[in-house]
Image (tube, helix red, strand yellow):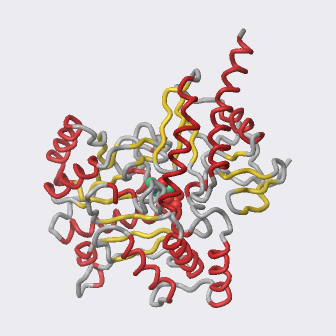
Amino acid sequence: MNDYTVWRPYCQMKTAPAPIEVIAAEGNTLVTAKHGRLLDGMASWWSACHGHRHPHIVQAIQTQMDKLPHVMFGGITHEGAERLATRLTKIVPGELSHVFFADSGSVAVEVAMKMAMGVARRRGHSQRRRFLAFDHAYHGDTTGAMSLCDPQRSMHRQYSGGILQQFHCPLPRNAQTYEAMRRLLEVNQEQIAGIFVEPLVQGAGGMRFHDPVVLDRIREACDHFGMLMIVDEIATGFARTGTLFAMQQADVDADIVCVGKALTAGTLTMAATLARPEVFDAFWSDDSSDALMHGPTFMANPLACAAANASLDLFESQPRCEQAQVIGETLRRVLAPARCLPGVTDVRTFGAIGVIEMEKETDWTAITGLLLRRGVWLRPFGKLLYTTPPLTLNIDEITQIGEAMVAAITELGSSRSHRTS
Ligand SMILES: *Cc1c(COP(=O)(O)O)cnc(C)c1O
C-alpha cells in the first residue's frame, strides 16, 4: 500500500485509471514511461501554444533564472513585468491600459470581480455586488469564480448553497434570449455590477461555440444598464480561435479582460486582469482603504514574465493565427466521418478546437486507452471528446489526432455491439 496519496484533479480516484507518467516533453509530443511518445492533443490544457520546450522560451527562462527567478511585487518592480504590461496593453483589443498580474486564471477572475465591485461602489451603487454569467459558463475553481459557473450543470454544483449566488441566463443568441437577458437585468439591475462572458467559445462548461453578435448584444446591455463587461479570454486568448483574441471577431470593447492559460506558452503559472482607465480610477483616491487589496505571493513572477515576453515574440514572428485556422480546417475534414457513428450527436470545429459530442457520458477509460495505442493524448470529459492542440502541429500530426478520435469512437461502438450480440 502507498503511504501517501497525490490527490488528482477532477478525478473520482476510486474508479479512475492510474495517471500516465510523463518524463519529458518536446515540441508537440509528450515522452511517457509506458506509452512511448504521445502527441499532446490538449496542449496541456490549452497552454502549450508553441509546443513544449520551444528553444526561444527555454532560453528566456534560463537567462532570467540566472538573474532574478523571483522577487515580491509589493513595493518592487522589474523590467520583465513592465515590458509585459506594455505589450499586453498593445495587443489586447480595446483601451485596456491597466494590468494586474495574477498567478492563475481563477485568481484573475476573482480580481476582475473585485474591480467591478469597486467601480460600482465608486459610482454610488455599493449594493451592486453580484454578477450575471451564462448557462454552461466556466470561469474557474476558486469560490468566487465557481459562483460564475453554470450552477446546475457545472462540476461545482455540489457546493451550491456554500458559494455566492449569482445570476445566470442563456447566452443571448437570438431575439428571444436577448429579451430574457434584458428582463433579468431590468429586474435585478440594482444588484449587478457586471456581466462575465467567455468570448465565442464556452470551454470547460461544454465546448460550445457562439456567434460574435452575442458579444455585441452583451455590450449593448452593459451600456444600457451601466454594468461592466468582463471578457474571460483565459481559454480563447493567444490565437486559439484563429485571431489573437476571440473578441477581435466581434466589434466590441470590454471593460475588463482576463488572460491566462497560454500566456506563458505552457511553462509557468501566470494570468492577468486588464482594465480600462475608468476601472482603475475607481480605486484612485487619497484614502488608502479605497485601494485594490489583492496581491498573490508569486504575482508577476519574473520567470513567468520572461516566458510570456518570449511567447509574445513568437506570436509576432510566427503565423500562429493562420496555423490555428489550418488546424480547424483539417480537423473539420478529418472528424466529419464521426457524424455517422452511433452515439455521436454533434461534431464541431472552431479555430484550433475540434469536438465530438456524444449522446451520453461514454467509457472514457476505454477511449483513452484506444487513443494511447495510436500515440495520442486526450482527456475527454462529460459527453465530449475534444482536442485543443499546440498551434505548431503539422498536417500529419493534426490528421493523426483527428483520425485517432474517429477510430476510438468507432472501435468503442463496435466492441459494444459485439458484446451485446
Ligand atoms: C481554465 C479557465 C479558467 C481558470 O484558470 P486556472 O488557471 O485553471 O485557474 C478560467 N476561465 C476559463 C475560461 C478557463 O478556461
Q: Is residue 142 visible?
A: no
The residue sitting at 50% across, 69% down in the picture is 315
> Which one is nearer the viewer's eye here, 104 or 387?
387
Residue 202 position within the rendered picture, expressed as x and y whole percent measured from the top left: 42, 47
Residue 249 position within the rendered picture, expressed as x and y whole percent measured from the top left: 33, 55
Q: Is residue 8 above or below residue 420?
A: below
Residue 168 position within the rendered picture, expressed as x and y whole percent measured from the top left: 31, 43
Furthest toward the right, the residue is 1
For the image shown, how many numbered marks are present on the structure?
0
Q: Is residue 223 visible?
A: yes
The residue sitting at 79% across, 60% down in the picture is 23
> Which one is nearer the viewer's eye here, 257 or 311?
311
Q: Is residue 84 above or below residue 373?
A: below
Furthest toward the top, the residue is 421
The residue sitting at 49% across, 73% down in the picture is 316
Q: Quadrant of the C terminus?
A: top right
Residue 134 position within the rendered picture, expressed as x and y whole percent measured from the top left: 34, 45
Quarter holding residue 87:
bottom left
Direction from residue 127 to residue 75 in the image, left or right? right
Q: Is residue 73 above or below residue 378?
A: below
Direction from residue 1 to residue 400 in the image, left or right? left
